[in-house]
């Protein structure tokens, strides 16, 4: 996830304030569409088989050792990560819960619908399409301003508690889950590197156009370390 500036239009609101900030039907629609597209993006990168995101390398590795689907592994991981929010005093929003429960099933649906490409050019197209769609989907559901995903909330919570920069915390988390995923049998590749380098700038670009502007008097622009 990209580090966001105050100009991004994101507001720092609590869970209840998020629901009262207006334009709720539109924001719920954006949240659900964003999560659906995110699931498709994950499926594209997994089916492309030339490197998924660090978290999905971990999910793939873990799925080799559990008698459940890839999507169920994502849900289990999300719940465990949410438990890590407790000592960080993070408060989940509706978007956090939706991300935790729906992203895995959306990924499973995408994996079931997509065939495995045989040619290298099509695998590259799957991977690049996955990165772009993931950035668009992230901007769409984050821009709905209904709470961060569990993994993003862990990142921002650790940053606040430790005083470390978002970049440092994000790097530490993603390197940790990537190494763990590879040790579990997940496969990293060039797609993993392209995702790591490209998804942040692309998400920042799409956020310019996809953030729902809130007029809530109590809202304030998110600081870079909070976004």
Image (cartoon, helix red, strand yellow):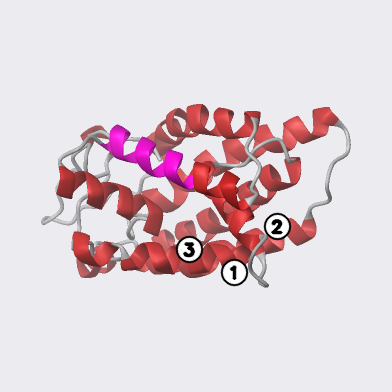
Q: Residues within 10 Å of mark 2 (few under 14, many from 20)?
A: many
In screen coordinates, is 114 left or right of 201?
right
The percent coordinates of residue 96 (x first, y second) are: 38, 63
Check if residue 171 falls in the magenta segment.
yes
Q: Residue at x 63, y 54 (%)?
A: 60
Give the dominant element type of the magenta stretch: helix, strand or loop: helix
Earlier sequence position, callout 3 versus callout 2: 3
* Image position, residue 219 (x, y; %): 15, 53
Q: Earlier in the sequence, mark 2 or mark 1?
A: 1
Task: Identify which residue is drawn at 23% across, 34% down.
Answer: 165
User: In the rendered image, is residue 59 in sight?
Assistant: yes
- According to the picture, the residue beneath numbered tag 3 turns out to be 77
Report the Cα–Cα distance between label 2 and label 1: 14 Å
- Using a 10 Å C-alpha cutoff, classify the residue at mark 3 as few (fewer than 14 neighbours), some (14 to 19) or many (20 or more): many
Residue beneath the point at 28% across and 68% down: 19
Labelled pair 3, 2 in contact (Cβ < 8 Å): no
**Secondary structure at numbered mark 2:** helix
The residue identified by callout 1 is: 72
Q: Quadrant of residue 173?
A: top left
């Amino acid at each position: 996830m990209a580090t966001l500036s105050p100009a991004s239009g994101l507001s720092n609101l609590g869970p209840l304030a998020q629901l009262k900030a207006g334009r709720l039907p539109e924001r719920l629609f954006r949240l659900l569409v964003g999560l659906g597209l995110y699931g498709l993006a994950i499926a594209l990168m997994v089916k492309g088989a030339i490197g998924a995101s660090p978290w999905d390398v971990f999910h793939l590795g873990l799925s080799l050792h559990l008698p459940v689907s890839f999507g169920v592994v994502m849900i289990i991981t999300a719940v465990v990560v949410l438990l890590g929010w407790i000592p960080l005093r993070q408060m989940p929003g509706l978007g956090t819960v939706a991300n935790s429960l729906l992203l895995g099933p959306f990924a499973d649906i995408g994996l079931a619908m997509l065939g495995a490409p045989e040619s290298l050019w099509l695998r590259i197209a799957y991977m690049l399409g996955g990165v772009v769609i993931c950035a668009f989907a992230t901007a769409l559901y984050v821009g709905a301003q209904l709470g961060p995903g569990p993994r993003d909330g862990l990142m921002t919570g650790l940053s606040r508690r430790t005083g470390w920069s978002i970049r440092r915390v994000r790097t530490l988390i993603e390197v940790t889950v990537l190494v763990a995923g590879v040790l579990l049998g997940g496969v990293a590749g060039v797609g993993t590197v392209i995702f790591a380098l490209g998804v942040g700038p692309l998400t920042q670009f799409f956020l310019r156009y996809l953030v729902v502007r809130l007029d809530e008097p109590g809202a304030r622009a998110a600081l870079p370390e909070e976004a």
